[in-house]
Image (spheres, helix red, strand yellow):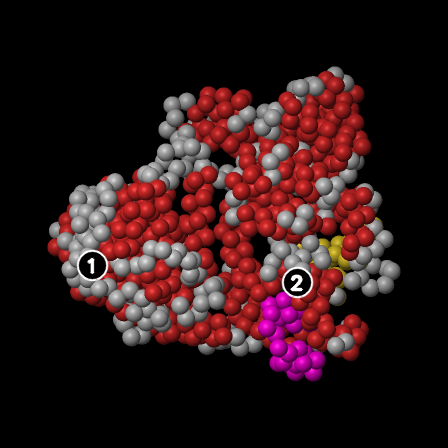
Amino acid sequence: MAKSSLKSAALMEQMKAHLSTDAGKDIVKKLNLVFQLNIAPKKIGFNEEIFVVDLKKGEVTQGPYEGGKPDATFSFTDEDFIKIASGKMNPQIAFMRGAIKIKGSMSAATKFTPDIFPKPSKM
Amino acid sequence: MAMRELVSGGAACAVPGSSSSSNPLGALANALIGSSSKTQERLQEIPTQSNGISEGNLYPGGQEAINALPGSELDHLQHPSSQGSAFLHNFRSSDQNRFADAWDDIQTPQMPPFQGRNGLTNFPLEHTRVQPNLEGPPQRVLSSFLHSFVNSGHQGLPLHPTQLPSLGLSEGDKKCIRDRSSIMARHIFADKSEDFLNSQVNALLSSLDIDTDIRSRGGPPGRFQEMEEYWNDSQVMQPNPHAADGWIAEFGQNRLQLADPNAWAHSFEKQHGANGWASEFEHEQSQLTSYDHMRGASIPNLAAMEQTRMLAHTLAQNDDPKFQNSKFLRFLSKMSQGDFNMDENQFRPPVISAPGDWATEYQQQYNKGQSWADQFAHEELAHAPEAWANEFSTKHGPVNDQWVDEFSKLNVQDWADEFGDQMGKGVLGDSSADNWADAYDEYVNEQATAKQRSEASRGVYVFSDLNPYVGHPNPMKEGQELFRKGLLSEAVLALEAEVLKNPDNAEGWRLLGIANAENDDDQQAIASMMRAQEVDPTNLEVLLALGVSHTNELEQQAALKYLYSWLSHHPKYSTIAPPELFESLYYADVSRCFNDAAKMAPEDADVHIVLGVLYNLSREYDKAIESFKTALELKPRDYSLWNKLGATQANSVQSADAILAYQQALDIKPNYVRAWANMGISYANQGMYEDSIRYYVRALAMNPKADNAWQYLRISLSCASRNDMLDACDARNLDVLQKEFPL
């Protein structure tokens, strides 16, 4: 994965490795969806880095989704994504407050929850 | 005058449902200022009063308190009509004791102007008087009776059931008084027997002719929850005879610190910011408006708008320029006119602008009359999730995406049902009907904690309240002893006391930083370590710790800076680290320097440790693991090193190995909170949720302030389908959780 300065990049890498474990394979089986994440360093929509969390094939890639249309596309800031993935921010509430912009299938969007992401351990 | 009308229950008062004879607001004002007739005079005097600091101080305090009323309770939309009287009760009762104490303080000789006032010395709230004044208007009788109930607690005297004249309390009032008094009684009398408590409460209630049997929790849950939480907290606290009087102690402390009758007003301000209540109200109003847009005309909103209108009206009637110009009033008028202009930044903190935007957007699109958008809007949208979905889809109406066309061909009702189903299944564990209210509650809570977090994240250390070690003769030694024994939270408190006493104690700050990090609080660890660095810029351990904490927080540049500083300040390796590199720190350069150092001195464990942290930064986990293993051969009893190894392994998804490493760390240091939390994470990442719960609970039992762990626990609970425990988790009820999930 190309070196990114976003904090989320670390999480994406961990996610990538996570998907090849048993737990990760369970998630893929359960969800079977493709999420595209447009993560911006400071303000939504500016200098976004795009990641695709493909929970159909079980991989995480950089860049827009090539294999068709993602089930749901999310736009948020670096900090907000970290908060959502760690359970500090409820995605529904974040959406209501406008901290996340969503495109695509609503039912897919509701499945974007903190439990699909592995948690970082602290040294 | 408007405020006075509010106070004395006048006709324009925007509080439906409360009978004037038991207007708690009136009682409140009476409690503050004296008899109701004198109140009228005083109230008229107040805005122009310039003499008598006490009085001048009191009323603005009271005014703020009164102004605070609208800001708090409007989120409970379930009881639009009763909320008015209900939250006045809430406000009155929950803060009554603080007023009582504040009032008591004011009565002390420090405030000579008061002694001279006849009306005030007659006030029944003096220390010596236990018998309540049973004469006078009903609200005064009620308030004085309640005050004597409080006082009886202070003095330990049993309250005698007294025959009170008919006070005209409504059922709602009675229920509130019953519930409030039992909670307050538990607080005040927590150090006495259960029997005493019950008899006190029964005496109170029978005097007021309130049924003691049925203790149903009617009324808005908001204040209850806070009270219950606080009460639970105080019960859960260390076995400490003063635990239940915590808040009294806190008040005492605050009073000592501030030493003026504005203590409570200030602390309210401190808590909520100078315009806190105004912005809280604004936040909440914006939510209401947004939701309003979503749902169209809904009953709770009409009530809220109506109330806002009335409030604005009464306030506007006051000619005082202070009122006229108040932000609050202007805001209210805007609100009641229904035209909430999202772009006016001056009224709102920037954080609301986002929801404002989409709400406006939504409205615009709504008005554009897209056919399928209309169809949506006219659907029976009884449930929040469908409304949410509705908002979402109309927002994207004008955008001609293909999916929109596809979408419009679908049966709308099916879609809404599907969504409703999804929400019903509780993907996030929320019940659909309360989504909105929960959303708002969480938002408000977040705002409250965000302030603290933002302070810490700016490197400002946040000291604990109620520190029992302040005033200890030698807190440094105590802190070191506690740390050695592994009592991390206690050590943190003792060390905080030390650095409060001696802010230049570098070792104190350093140890505090280590303790915080081991307690799994990187924010506080960073703040402490930065202070340590200020005092002693060359301390290598401090620099390493800062590097580690920043790496944990994924702050790459900062971490790199500190790790490089470690090298440049090291007596042996400073030659390898040219200072010019500081200007533009590139990872590759730093890494090279460190490798040189390692070659220079392969027996130096520390170099390997720093290298390991560096490799974590660049996510070269294999190299990091190697470095840590090398260091461990040289320093096998370093528990923190085992934890670093474990964390590295966990982050490179070798969770099984990680658990072994954590176990080693815990064998050496059993109270290592961070390692317990990391264990939980490793189990959760492997999908072993039931196990992870136990480890999280264990970590939290040692440090209930570990916010990360609370969030992770919640996630694990819902993954393990233990939604029954979610409430306990949200309430941070460790007792229940520990009983349910022992290790």
Vertical relation: B687 (above or below) B537: below
Residue at point 46%, 21% (across, down): B477
Q: Quadrant of residue B46?
A: bottom left
Vertical relation: B727 (above or below) B643: below
Residue range in magenta is B366-393
- Looking at the image, residue B50 sits to the left or right of residue B625; the answer is left
Query: For numbered disc 2, what is the local secondary structure?
Result: helix
Which of the pair B53/B197 is nearer the observer?
A: B197
Query: Chief secondary structure of the magenta span?
Result: helix
Which of the pair B560/B689 is nearer the observer?
A: B689
Which of the pair B333/B305 is nearer the observer?
A: B305
Three-letter code, disc 1: Leu
- Looking at the image, residue B736 sits to the left or right of residue B47; the answer is right
Which residue is disc 2 drawn over? B423
Which residue is disc 1 drawn over? B164
Instruction: Inspect this view and state whether residue B682 appears.
Output: yes
Look at the image and tell me in which quarter the C terminus of chain A lies.
top right
